[in-house]
Image: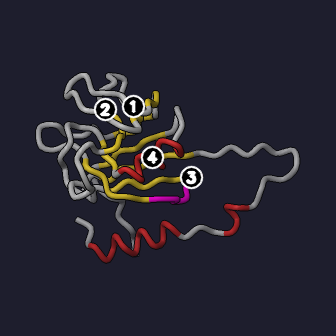
Amino acid sequence: MICLSELFRFFLGVLAVSWSASVPPADGQEYTSSREAVILIDCQTIIFLENGRETNLALVSTGRAGFNTPTGTFEVLYRRRAPVSSSYGVRMPYWLCIHPSGQIGLHQTFLSGTNFLGTRRSHGCIRLGEITARWSYDWLSVGSNVRIQTESPRRVS
């Protein structure tokens, strides 16, 4: 398990954005942005990357025992503003579907407050706080990669 000070240093390093990221492409060159989200299950954290550079991070709530969140690389298949779960009968604002079954995705937590973020409490989805859910819904597009990893990457000193 990564210690809190290591995680803090990691995030500080990750959030540093260099000046070169804001330089527009030269005339005649097309600029395409690659956006993805990385969920770190052991830290209950999501990191948003644009062209490999971190742009945002937040706490999440992933699958509890018996309802583990699947790991691997997925992509946003479709988006819905506020669908209702056919399995659980709850509204899932800012739904980003990432699994072909249509049953796993990123969405705003339906629990009041954010006191459940940072803990494994979902039925497999990645629950986000209201601000993060709204932001990620606008920021990620259909086709964006979503990587779900069991452990945080280890940094070599």
From the viewer's perspective, is 97 left or right of 89? right
Main SS of the magenta part reads strand
* Quarter location, residue 81: top left
Element type at mark 1: strand
Sequence-first tag of 3 and 2: 3
Q: CA distance from mark 3 to mark 1?
A: 20 Å
Mark 3 Cα-neighbour bin, 10 Å: few <14, some 14–19, many ≥20:
some
Q: CA distance from mark 3 to mark 4?
A: 17 Å
Residue topped by disc 3: 50
* Quarter location, residue 151: bottom left
Q: Residue furthest right?
A: 27
Mark 2 Cα-neighbour bin, 10 Å: few <14, some 14–19, many ≥20:
some
Element type at mark 4: helix
Relative height, residue 62 to residue 96 (above, below): below
Residue topped by disc 1: 97
Relative height, residue 66 to residue 84 (above, below): below
Q: CA distance from mark 2 to mark 1?
A: 6 Å
Which residues make up the magenta segment?
Answer: 50-56
Q: Which mark is residue 134?
A: 4
Q: Amino acid at mark 1?
A: Cys
